[in-house]
Image (spheres, grey):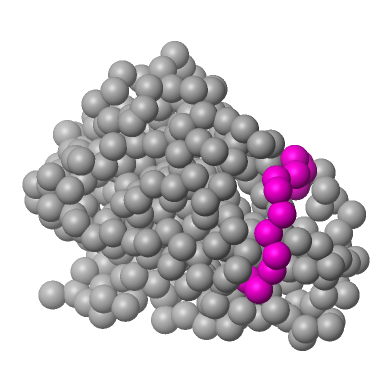
Amino acid sequence: MTRCALIVGGLGLVGRGLVDHLLAAGDWEVVAVSRRKPDFQTRARYVSADALDLEDCRLKLRDVGGITHLFYAANNPSEEVEPNLRMLQNVVTAVEEISPDLQHVNFMQGTKAYGTHFGPYKTPAKESDPRHFPPNWYYDQEDFIRARSVQSGWSWSAMRPRIICGPYARTPYNTSLVIGVYATLCKHYGLPLRFPGVEEAYKPIVQLVDTAHLAKATVWAATTAACAGEIFNVTNGGLFRWQHLWPQLARSLGMECAPPQAIRLSQAMRDKRSVWCDIVRIYNLAPHDFSELLQWEDSDFVFNTTYDSLVDTTKLHRFGFHDIVDDLEMFQRHFERLRAARIIP
């Protein structure tokens, strides 16, 4: 029996991974919601809708119907509670009205649920750890889903990924894309690849998660009865320190590695649009506008975190998900796909 998945945030980093995974599975009908239209070929059906507007959600989704699984991977960039909660409420309300056979809602959280954005926290973080002092829109969304599932009869699950990496352009919070584009600019200037953060951030323990790995874990959780009502930390399965991985990344990109140099990429990239235009012309890359290609602000946090930031994935394994991904192999695979898509040379 073909199941129907609605992926909200279908052009985001997590959403792209879910779309690819479900299409590859072959037994899913895939509908994705996003504000803009895809700029690539896909068999998924994309619907443009504003999750902040309930009536727009109702209007744009009214002809979809038959949704069995809702995957919610959207967020409001303000990171405020009210708009993020309202977006989820609107989508769930609209989907329930058109799909009485809705079975499961899966939604993305993140390790900010543990207070990673405030500074050092208890590590490794576990799903059972207490909440930090509010506000945190993950908590409000979770409370809504818990209560609504009881009223409506569908089950739910939630994922808490670490730093997410994927082989896609125009996806914010994408560390693979950040490194690939930053390395391309360094190479253009004839510079070695320096870790663009403070020395103290070069040594703590770090975890990542591949979009493909996250998608596989997410769909597994959404279709495994034992996972109903559960939250799972998700990582590739390994640990590393940038001081050990960074030289390997440089070699993978055919570059020399040099000691760290603290660069606020969000500031350093403000005047690089014309430079990127030159690179696009020289290497015949896809003509993405530099301002839309990626987001640099989150990388300032990723590359300047001076404390261990890791989560415990015992629960995920205990419930039956045992896949792992090698971090270096993941980056190499992503760089190859970015080259194939003419995002980097």
Provide the residue span drawn in magenta: 253-265
Point 43% across, 74% down: residue:
45
Point 57% across, 71% down: residue:
252
Quadrant where the C terminus is found in the figure: bottom right
Q: Nearer the viewer, residue 11 or 306?
A: 306
Residue 228 position in % (x across, y down): 15, 44
Residue 18 position in % (x across, y down): 38, 64
User: Is residue 102 shown to the viewer in this render?
Assistant: no
Magenta residue check for 256: yes
User: Is residue 284 depicted above or below 302 in this figure?
Assistant: below
User: Is residue 282 depicted above or below 138 in this figure?
Assistant: below
User: Is residue 138 shown to the viewer in this render?
Assistant: yes
Point 27% across, 67% down: residue:
4
User: Is residue 79 depicted above or below 235 in this figure?
Assistant: above
Residue 255 position in % (x across, y down): 69, 68
Quadrant where the N terminus is found in the figure: bottom left
